[in-house]
Every structure is written in C-alpha cells, then in structure tokens.
Amino acid sequence: MRDGAAKSNPLREADKAHHLHPFTDPKHVAEFGAHIIAHADGVHITDEFGNRLLDAMAGLGGVNIGYGRAEMAETAAHAMQELAYYHSFSAATHPAAARLAEKLIALAGPAFDRVFFSNSGSEANETIAKIIRHYWRRKGRPEKRFFIARDMAYHGSTWLTASLSGLPHMHAAFGLPEGDIRHIEAPFWYRNGGDLAPDEYGLVAARALEEAIADIGADNIAAFFGEPVQATAGAIIPPATYWPEIQRICRANDILIVADEVVTGFGRTGHWFAHPAFGFEADFMTLAKGLSSTYQPIAASLVSAEVADAIAEGGAFQHGFTTSAHPVAAAVALRNIEIMEREGLVQRTATELGPMLADALEELTDLPLVGEVRAMGAIAGIELAKDKAKRMQYPLELGVCGQVAGQTLMRGVIVRPTGNALVMCPPLTFEAEHVETLKAALAEALIVVAGQLGL
C-alpha cells in the first residue's frame, strides 16, 4: 500500500522531475524519489506515511533546541510583520542585527570585536578567507595567500570552501581544489596514531603543520582553518595536546587561526564555543547551524578588533550578500539564544546529556563491529572496524556503515553514516529515554549487520 502511495505521490513526482538535491546521487532520486518529511516536533520528525523517527542528527547537527518551538514561529511572524526585509549595505541596519551582533560578541568574549552576517557556514568561511586576504594586503604582505586546512575537513561547498575541505569526493567533479591551499593530516588517533599514545600522537599530528610551513614558507601562509572537532569526518576529537601545539606553531610563524565552529558552536560540545575548551585562541570564528537552531538560514563570521581596524583603513568592504543580517533570521537567532540561556541547555549538555550519551554509547564497544566510541557533549561518533586489534577499516565500497545506518533507521532512529563512522549530533533537548532508544536501535543494527557479514 505504501509502495503504491509512494509511486503516485504528485509531490514526489514533482521533486523527482525538478529538484536537484545537495550531496545526493540524482540517479537515486530518479529511481526511488525523495523521502518526504512532513512534520517535526521536539526530537522527532514524521514522514509522509506517519512514521515517527527519533532524529539523533538534529537535522544536520543544527536543531539544538529541538523542533516545533512555538515561540520561534511567533518571533518569526512578528519580525516579518515589523520588517520583512531590509539590507545591511551602505551603513543600513535594523534592531535585530545590532542586538544580535552585540550578543554574539558578549558570548564570544574579548578575543572578538566585529561580526559579519551571512546565510550559511560556507558563506561564513568564504567571508573569513576574503577578510584574511584583505587583511594581509592592508598589512603590506600580499604574498601571504596560502591557506592550510586538514584532510577530512569540511568547511563548506562554495568554490573556495570546497577547496578548503579535505574531502576528495567533493573535488573531483569540479576540478578542485584550487591552488594556494594545502591539506595536512587530520588528528585522527584511531586511524593514524599507530602505536603512539593519544597525547604523543597529538603532537606528531600538529607538527605536520611545521612540515607544510617549511615547504611553503611562513611568509606565504595566511591562515590555518580548523574545526575544533571534525564532525563530518566522523566526530574526530583531537588529543588534548593537539590544538595548543597548533597555536604555538601558528603564533611562531605569524599565521592566523580560524576556528570553524559551524557545528561545534552553541552548546554542541557542552560549551558555548568549543575552541577555548581545547586550549587555543582563534583570530576568527565562524558560526551557523546552532546560531538559529537552523530555524532560519543565518551565519556569522567573528573577527578581532585588530583585524577589523586594519581592513577598515581600506575603504568600503567590497563583500556581502543580499540577505546578510536578514531581520527575520536575526530575530529568530536572538530568540534561539534566549531559549538556550533560559533553559540552561549548554550547561545541561556538559553535565547531563553529554555524560549520559557517552556512557550509553560506550556500552556498545563490545559488539563485533565497534572499534571506538568518541563523544564530547552532544556530538559522538562510532568507528566501525573490520579488525579491532589492528584498527583495520572495512573497504568503503562494502558500504558497511551505510548498512548499519539503514538498519538503525528501520528501527526508527536517524544517525549519519560517514565513511566507516556513524555520527550523532542530537538536539540538546534529548532526554534519557531518547538516549536509551538510540542505544537500543544501534545495538540491534550493529548485531544484524555483523551477522550478515558472518561475524
């Protein structure tokens, strides 16, 4: 009955005919159509057939306050009635933009002084890259053009940010990456650490930056881009020694540091922002997702006073977007932050949800497929291993991770497969019952797939 309904659904047919989906094989959509999501509330989404699914990914790691908040809808409606749109070009502003900028700087602390608003994490990182180039030119050092990022990094999908991303499958179709970008080893102890202890390996991984500097020349390098936790790559949580050593190397070589907190910002790791918890200071920070809990498209690029003052001497800043600091999106972001503060969601993630999630997932480590569990706050990864003793991965073409995610979905829970790791970024409103449901679904899925593999 449902198969027939799926084939005859006019919305699915319209989508198949005309909607080009991001990060999706068009052949899959042409053959099977898209999965239509009809409703969401709390920590669940409901599809067109009435299937109610526990969303352990908070959309794409962004619905931090959970779905269906009435006051968010009311805020958007009121903002739209007051000022549906006005731009922020040519020194124009509106109350929500001014208040949101002030609030972000207050939350971020004294390292940052100015905010540029855009619509997505990709745009936020692209903005920072342009600001950095502008800054070094203003300082009389235009040769400092190179950006260094890391393997398995995700910084966005625009021309430049896709190049910054260390994901070859994002590059091949478009002839990327562009020049003036170098990737170094990701601080992925489980896969790259060998016989080293995590803290030893953290220093080794960081010193790959020194090797790149020696090759390129410090005078040619503008900045280092890094996510405090590499979420898209499988929730890679670096050893404690890694980020302080990265900072030491950057400061010694006059290289700026960009903390890409598009995923990790706004409580995801149990901190408003993750990079201070890893023991480093950034010159720039990029934010999106949790800024509005993805109720509206909005992103922010934070810069220091020193950088802002330097580029201010260069005349009009020739960069922007029609909907930068959109009044409705800014108002919704302010309400989102108010909810997070009122309900203590950041502290709750640090003291309740984070430990609860980590403990529950740790109970899965004895199952045949589980090589490692990584967790910090409300971000977690389960590394799948073909050989636990040797930390050996399954060949990606076998799609083992996708099979586990599919089995988990069949049990009513959404997780995200990425390579040989399952990623979870649940809403910060997850309760104990939701964590238990997640654990049970994963356990069953892992056992089923292990059986199919003859384990």
Image (cartoon, rainbow, N blue to C red):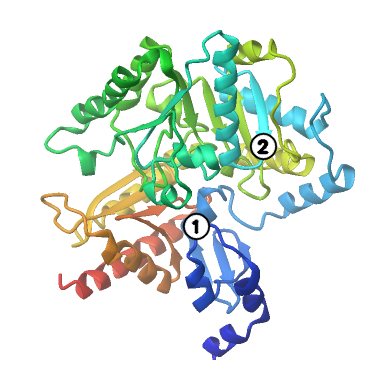
Q: Is residue 73 left or right of residue 9?
A: right
Per the image, label 2 sits on a secondary structure element best described as: strand
Quadrant for the N terminus, please: bottom right
Residue at 14% x, 38% y: name it: 194
Question: Camera-side residue: 103 or 191?
Answer: 191
Question: Camera-side residue: 368 or 177?
Answer: 177
Kindly identify which residue carries mark 2. 118
- Disc 2 crowd rating (10 Å Cα; few below 14, some 14-19, many 20+) is many
Lower position in the chain sequence, tag 2 or tag 1? 1
Per the image, label 1 sits on a secondary structure element best described as: loop
In x, y percent, where is residue 74? 78, 51
Distance between the alpha carbons at the discs numbered 2 and 1:
21 Å
User: To which quarter of the image does residue 448 belong?
Assistant: bottom left
Question: Camera-side residue: 397 or 406?
Answer: 397
Kindly identify which residue carries mark 1. 23
User: To which quarter of the image does residue 15 belong?
Assistant: bottom right
Look at label 2 and name its amino acid.
Ser
Q: In this view, does 38 lie to the left or right of 450?
A: right
